[in-house]
Image (cartoon, helix red, strand yellow):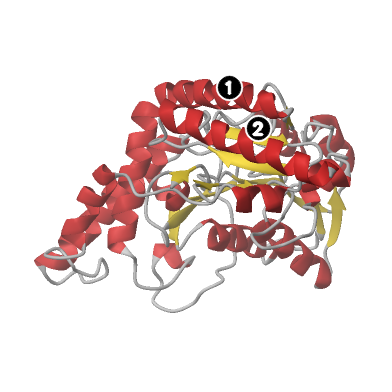
Amino acid sequence: MIYLDNHATTPVDPRVLDAMLPYLKERFGNAASRSHRLGWEAEEAVERARAQVARLVGADPREIVFTSGASEANNLALKGAAGRRGEKNHVVASPLEHPSVRETVEHLAARGCDVTWLPVDREGRVRPDDVAGAITPRTFLVTVMAANNEIGTVQPVREIGRIAAECGILFHTDATQAVGKVALDVRADGVHLAALTAHKIFGPKGSGALYVRQGTALEPQTHGGGQERGLRSGTLNVPGIVGLGAACDICRTGREGEAARLARLRDRLEGLLAAAEARANGPREGRLPNNLHISFPGVDAESLMLAVPEVAVSSGSACASGSMEISRVLKAIGMRPDAARGSIRFGLGRFNTEAEIDEAARLFVAAATRLRKVARR
């Protein structure tokens, strides 16, 4: 199978696996066990990984809190901030957020917070002026994802961070899709809270992190042994954390070259799919280098994917795998329902080759042409 669903998850890089294996076998200690060598080795590995994650995003290692992934990190950030909000009760949020953010914001709304959902333009971009206009004296948090997981829009994070700083409120960003693909510097960008996960950057599933700027108060969501400065209790997943750190190091040293290569492959794929009258959605500039969200007019995306079982992709219209509803993202940018239902998301990755791109394009062009002929009978 040609795997072009790297927004959903990525295969583990062999270099990451090599880094993890010792901590699954001979170095199996608990990082909280400080009375013997195995525990010391585990703790050293965790702190090394903490520094690796911090270097990738421009943070201090003490600002990195390990979690099970980005969904948990987003929950800790938003619920934790709400637990320390004092008298303020207003959240400003983008409508393009991942469910782990959107549903958490809706959870806060059900418990007394007011929420302003920001408008976006036709490319899915939040305008900083709209953020500034939505902030009130009661606002304690702004949340806007760094890059969208469907249409690849990269948001003006630094401008939004500057506005939040000027107003003295917290700025949270779900950086899951952006980390390792575009430049991100949480300090320079004015970010207080940022979520990321290993399995989007060729690391293992079940390992993620939350950046918490020093001085940012959060209410813990998991209580127990007091790990991670009391913000996230529980025995640390040492092999997963080591894998996250290794994946971050690889991204840090190779991001620019990899992004350029993926952008070339993405543009090649888009050009080849034009033979099937396919049209790209989302921004032309300021998008993830590995993202191609594209519509095939007159073709149902679900039928098209079934006709090309050799290639793993996602329906560009569904908010979750298996869902037939048009996603909130496509609704927010004003896409017509028929165009949305005929759209597919291609997510390119580190191990894709030009030959795979050419073959995937050939298969989709042939299938789309065939399905259109059937529909016209």
- Measuring 52% from the left and 28% from the top, which residue is drawn there? 183
Q: Is residue 168 visible?
A: no
- Between disc 2 and disc 1, the foreground one is 1
Residue 154 image label: 2
Residue 255 position, x and y percent, is 42, 28
Give me the C-alpha separation between circle 2 and circle 1.
17 Å
Quarter of the rendering occupied by the C terminus: top right
The reply, left or right, for residue 29 in relation to residue 337 is: left
Q: Give above or below for 177 relative to 100.
A: above
Q: Give above or below for 338 relative to 238.
A: above
User: Viewer-proximal residue, 325 or 202?
Assistant: 325
Q: Is residue 243 visible?
A: yes
- Where disc 1 sits, the SS reads helix
Residue 170 image label: none
Snapshot quadrant of residue 24: bottom left
- Where disc 2 sits, the SS reads loop
Give the residue type at disc 1: Asp
Residue 190 position, x and y percent, is 62, 35
Contact (CB < 8 A) between labels 2 and 1? no
Snapshot quadrant of residue 129: top right
- Measuring 72% from the left and 27% from the top, which residue is drawn there? 283
- Per the image, the residue denoted by label 1 is 267
Give the residue type at disc 2: Val
- Measuring 51% from the left and 42% from the top, which residue is drawn there? 4
The reply, left or right, for residue 340 in relation to residue 176 is: right
